[in-house]
Image: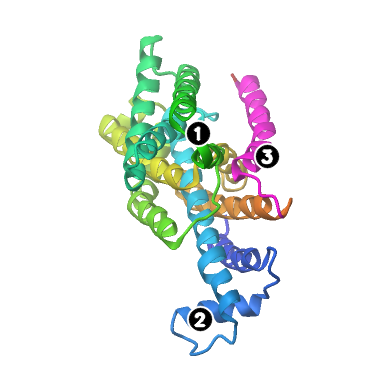
Amino acid sequence: MNRLTLPALALLILLSAVIAVTLGPADISAGEVWAVILHHLGLLPDSGVTRLRDAIVWELRLPRVGTALIVGAGLALSGAVMQALTRNPLADPYLLGLSSGAALGAVSLALVGLTLLMPIGAFFGSLAALALALLVARLLGGVTPSRTILAGISISALASALTSLLIFWYATGDSYREILAWLMGTLSGSLWADAGLVALALVICGPVILVSGRALDAFAFGDTAAATLGVDVVRLRWILLGTTALLTGIMVSVGGAIGFVGLVVPHAVRLVTGSRHRALLPHTMLVGALFMLWTDTAARTLFDPRELPVGIITAIIGAPIFLLVLLRYRRVT
């Protein structure tokens, strides 16, 4: 892998973000976007842009683009870690129940009016779902890759059913429609506060995961081999599982239960970087950001003025790739 790949990806993300901000009902040029950004950063005394267009760029589109980038990076990074820890190429936060558990925790608090505590509910919901999936896999005879994924699917279905029951029973009027759209995954209405929250989660959790690349490589050979190589298997596994649950929970509390990002992106990146996690993890994070940026842009512009939940777009792309991975995994095993 060329050392320039990461800077090239970062530059591509910057250019894509500017282009994405220009797309929408209001025709805004890239020059106006740069002028607004430089003006609000204090580097340009006057942007020369009307107040309305300034608000569209700074208060509507830029927060959404920023949120999409960080949510994509976080979900993709979580998926890469889950696949390494479970040694299962089909694992991701959605299939292992983390996303559904996070949604259940967040919706439970939202329905009782504690919307500010949704990230905390999402974290504990994702952590509980993951613990239940591992417990069920152990009760089935041991935490093997196939048992873990089957247990995760069952926990995910149970959490989704409980979430639907809560919404059906308690949600009324517009809140019913809003929560339903959120459950399908949407970044509509993202504010700078949302972008700040997910950025804080990524800043806290990202370094913990990125410095664990060599240990995750050791996990590929099994727990015994990893322990032989000097890895404190139990301690590191729980640290990474807790970190991933926190990261996924915060991302879901802002963007909803967006599926397949954590599954699709690590596999696509692995084809280019190989399976060594020191290269895989940072590239997965950046490609995940790029993937979410363009899927969200497609969700809000393809059928304008109607906007699709971004989870529909990621599912349309991710489901066929999931089947390909499933067929490849079947041949290998």
The answer to if 326 sits in the magenta stretch is: yes
Q: Which residue is mark 3?
A: 317
* 226 displayed left or right of 44: left
Residue 200 on image: x %, y %: 36, 56
Q: How is the image coloured?
A: rainbow
Secondary structure under tag 1 reads loop
- Asked which secondary structure carries label 2, the reply is helix
Q: Which quadrant of the figure has residue 322?
A: top right
Mark number for residue 38? 2
- x, y percent for residue 94: 50, 33
Can residue 168 be found in the magenta stretch? Answer: no
Q: Magenta region's main secondary structure?
A: helix
Q: Position of residue 92 (x, y in %)?
A: 50, 34
Q: Amino acid at mark 1?
A: Asp
In the image as oriented, which residue stretches furthest toward the front?
173
Residue occupying image coordinates x 68% and y 68%: 26
Query: Going by the picture, which residue comes out furthest to the right?
Result: 303
Q: Which mark is residue 92?
A: 1
Q: Amino acid at mark 2?
A: Leu
Q: Nearer the viewer, residue 7 or 109?
A: 109
Residue at point 34%, 18% (across, down): 135
Q: Quadrant of the C terminus?
A: top right
Whether residue 130 sits left or right of residue 232 in the image: it is right
Q: Are marks 3 and 1 in contact (CB under 8 Å)?
A: no
Q: Which residues are drawn in magenta?
A: 305-332
Dot 3 falls on a residue whose secondary structure is helix
Q: Give the foreground label among 1 and 2.
A: 2
Can the viewer see residue 215? Answer: no
Q: Is residue 28 visible in the rendered structure shown here?
A: yes
Residue drawn at point x = 44 percent, y = 21 percent: 155
Indicate which disc, 1 or 2, sits on the residue closer to the N terminus: 2
